Image: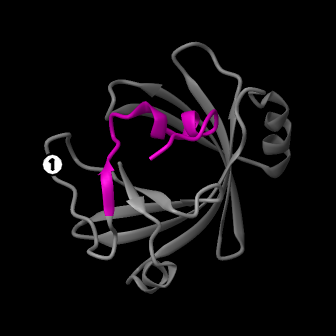
Amino acid sequence: KYLIEYPDKAALEAAEGVRVKRIEQTYLLADKGETRRVRKMTEKGVTRYIETRKYRVSDLRATEEERDLSATEYEALLTLADPDLRPIYKTRYAIPYAGHVVEVDLYDFWRDRATVEVELADEQENAALPPYLRVIREVSGDKRYKNVNLARELPEN
Protein backbone atom coordinates (compact mmCIF):
# COMPACT_ATOMS: atom_id res chain seq x y z
CA LYS A 1 0.00 0.00 0.00
CA TYR A 2 1.34 3.43 -0.97
CA LEU A 3 0.47 6.99 -0.07
CA ILE A 4 0.37 8.94 -3.35
CA GLU A 5 -0.13 12.52 -4.46
CA TYR A 6 -3.74 13.21 -5.38
CA PRO A 7 -3.91 11.79 -8.91
CA ASP A 8 -5.36 13.21 -12.11
CA LYS A 9 -8.91 11.79 -12.19
CA ALA A 10 -8.97 12.02 -15.98
CA ALA A 11 -5.92 9.73 -16.18
CA LEU A 12 -7.59 7.24 -13.82
CA GLU A 13 -10.86 7.29 -15.78
CA ALA A 14 -9.01 6.89 -19.10
CA ALA A 15 -7.07 3.80 -17.95
CA GLU A 16 -7.85 0.73 -20.03
CA GLY A 17 -10.22 -1.66 -18.25
CA VAL A 18 -10.79 0.67 -15.26
CA ARG A 19 -13.69 -0.10 -12.93
CA VAL A 20 -15.00 2.75 -10.75
CA LYS A 21 -16.76 1.98 -7.49
CA ARG A 22 -18.28 4.34 -4.95
CA ILE A 23 -17.81 2.87 -1.47
CA GLU A 24 -19.42 3.69 1.86
CA GLN A 25 -17.66 1.71 4.58
CA THR A 26 -18.85 1.46 8.19
CA TYR A 27 -16.99 -0.32 10.97
CA LEU A 28 -19.02 -2.40 13.38
CA LEU A 29 -18.43 -3.36 16.98
CA ALA A 30 -16.22 -6.48 16.95
CA ASP A 31 -14.40 -8.93 19.18
CA LYS A 32 -10.73 -8.31 20.03
CA GLY A 33 -8.45 -9.35 17.17
CA GLU A 34 -11.23 -8.97 14.61
CA THR A 35 -12.21 -6.10 12.33
CA ARG A 36 -15.80 -6.13 11.16
CA ARG A 37 -17.25 -3.80 8.54
CA VAL A 38 -20.10 -3.39 6.10
CA ARG A 39 -19.79 -1.81 2.69
CA LYS A 40 -22.25 -0.32 0.29
CA MET A 41 -20.55 -0.46 -3.13
CA THR A 42 -22.07 1.10 -6.22
CA GLU A 43 -20.68 0.50 -9.69
CA LYS A 44 -22.46 1.54 -12.89
CA GLY A 45 -25.70 2.08 -10.97
CA VAL A 46 -25.68 -1.38 -9.36
CA THR A 47 -25.35 -1.51 -5.56
CA ARG A 48 -23.96 -4.42 -3.55
CA TYR A 49 -23.90 -4.76 0.21
CA ILE A 50 -21.09 -6.77 1.82
CA GLU A 51 -20.11 -7.72 5.36
CA THR A 52 -16.43 -8.44 5.98
CA ARG A 53 -14.70 -9.96 8.98
CA LYS A 54 -10.94 -9.51 8.89
CA TYR A 55 -8.30 -11.21 11.02
CA ARG A 56 -4.77 -9.76 10.83
CA VAL A 57 -1.98 -12.33 10.22
CA SER A 58 0.89 -9.82 9.77
CA ASP A 59 1.37 -6.18 8.72
CA LEU A 60 1.04 -7.25 5.10
CA ARG A 61 -1.45 -10.10 5.34
CA ALA A 62 -4.93 -10.67 6.70
CA THR A 63 -7.55 -13.37 6.31
CA GLU A 64 -11.02 -12.24 5.33
CA GLU A 65 -14.48 -13.70 5.39
CA GLU A 66 -17.03 -11.90 3.22
CA ARG A 67 -20.71 -12.38 2.60
CA ASP A 68 -23.23 -10.55 0.48
CA LEU A 69 -26.10 -8.84 2.27
CA SER A 70 -29.54 -7.66 1.32
CA ALA A 71 -30.26 -3.94 1.72
CA THR A 72 -32.38 -4.80 4.77
CA GLU A 73 -29.55 -6.81 6.41
CA TYR A 74 -27.12 -3.97 5.67
CA GLU A 75 -29.40 -1.39 7.31
CA ALA A 76 -29.83 -3.66 10.35
CA LEU A 77 -26.06 -4.10 10.75
CA LEU A 78 -25.54 -0.32 10.64
CA THR A 79 -27.18 -0.25 14.07
CA LEU A 80 -24.04 -2.06 15.33
CA ALA A 81 -21.69 0.70 14.06
CA ASP A 82 -18.70 1.35 16.31
CA PRO A 83 -19.37 4.80 17.80
CA ASP A 84 -15.61 5.52 17.97
CA LEU A 85 -15.14 5.14 14.21
CA ARG A 86 -16.61 7.38 11.53
CA PRO A 87 -17.79 5.96 8.19
CA ILE A 88 -15.31 6.11 5.31
CA TYR A 89 -16.50 7.44 1.93
CA LYS A 90 -14.24 6.87 -1.06
CA THR A 91 -14.13 6.29 -4.79
CA ARG A 92 -12.06 3.30 -5.90
CA TYR A 93 -10.47 3.04 -9.33
CA ALA A 94 -9.53 -0.61 -10.01
CA ILE A 95 -7.06 -0.60 -12.89
CA PRO A 96 -5.54 -3.69 -14.53
CA TYR A 97 -1.80 -3.05 -14.77
CA ALA A 98 1.27 -5.28 -15.22
CA GLY A 99 -0.60 -8.48 -14.43
CA HIS A 100 -2.27 -7.14 -11.26
CA VAL A 101 -5.15 -4.89 -10.30
CA VAL A 102 -4.02 -1.52 -8.94
CA GLU A 103 -6.66 -0.05 -6.58
CA VAL A 104 -6.52 3.73 -6.21
CA ASP A 105 -8.70 5.05 -3.38
CA LEU A 106 -9.73 8.71 -3.40
CA TYR A 107 -11.11 9.54 0.05
CA ASP A 108 -13.68 12.31 0.49
CA PHE A 109 -11.65 13.81 3.36
CA TRP A 110 -8.40 14.35 1.36
CA ARG A 111 -7.76 16.63 -1.60
CA ASP A 112 -3.95 16.43 -1.60
CA ARG A 113 -3.29 12.69 -1.36
CA ALA A 114 -4.75 9.24 -1.88
CA THR A 115 -3.71 5.63 -1.48
CA VAL A 116 -2.96 2.86 -3.94
CA GLU A 117 -2.87 -0.81 -3.12
CA VAL A 118 -1.77 -3.84 -5.14
CA GLU A 119 -2.47 -7.38 -3.95
CA LEU A 120 0.57 -9.51 -4.67
CA ALA A 121 1.05 -13.29 -4.81
CA ASP A 122 3.60 -13.10 -1.98
CA GLU A 123 5.36 -10.50 0.17
CA GLN A 124 8.59 -10.70 -1.90
CA GLU A 125 6.95 -9.70 -5.18
CA ASN A 126 7.44 -6.12 -6.42
CA ALA A 127 4.45 -3.92 -7.18
CA ALA A 128 4.43 -2.12 -10.53
CA LEU A 129 2.42 1.11 -10.60
CA PRO A 130 1.23 3.17 -13.56
CA PRO A 131 3.60 6.09 -14.32
CA TYR A 132 0.90 8.73 -13.74
CA LEU A 133 0.79 7.85 -10.01
CA ARG A 134 3.28 9.80 -7.87
CA VAL A 135 4.31 7.85 -4.78
CA ILE A 136 4.95 9.79 -1.58
CA ARG A 137 5.97 6.65 0.34
CA GLU A 138 5.08 3.05 1.06
CA VAL A 139 2.67 2.72 4.00
CA SER A 140 2.06 -1.06 4.03
CA GLY A 141 3.35 -1.38 7.58
CA ASP A 142 2.11 2.02 8.79
CA LYS A 143 -0.99 1.28 10.86
CA ARG A 144 -2.15 4.91 10.55
CA TYR A 145 -3.10 4.24 6.91
CA LYS A 146 -5.24 1.17 7.54
CA ASN A 147 -8.85 2.08 6.76
CA VAL A 148 -9.99 1.20 10.27
CA ASN A 149 -7.50 3.73 11.65
CA LEU A 150 -8.42 6.35 9.03
CA ALA A 151 -11.95 5.98 10.40
CA ARG A 152 -10.51 6.95 13.80
CA GLU A 153 -8.08 9.78 13.00
CA LEU A 154 -6.47 11.30 9.91
CA PRO A 155 -2.66 11.12 9.88
CA GLU A 156 -0.44 13.97 8.79
CA ASN A 157 1.76 13.39 5.73
Residue 5: percent from left, percent from top: 41, 64
Q: Magenta residues, as a range?
A: 135-157
Count every numbered label the image shows and give the total.
Answer: 1
User: Which quarter of the picture shows residue 94?
Assistant: bottom left
Residue at 28% x, 72% y: name it.
130
Residue at 62% x, 30% y: name it.
36
Residue at 57% x, 27% y: name it.
35
For residue 148, side relative to residue 130 (left or right): right
Residue 58: percent from left, percent from top: 32, 25
Outermost residue on the top side: it is: 32
- The local secondary structure at tag 1 comes to loop
Residue 146: percent from left, percent from top: 48, 38
For residue 115, side relative to residue 38 (left or right): left
What residue would you read off at disc 1?
125
Residue 137: percent from left, percent from top: 30, 50
Could you tell me the amino acid type at mark 1? Glu
Along the line of sight, which residue is nearer the eye, 10 or 36?
Answer: 10
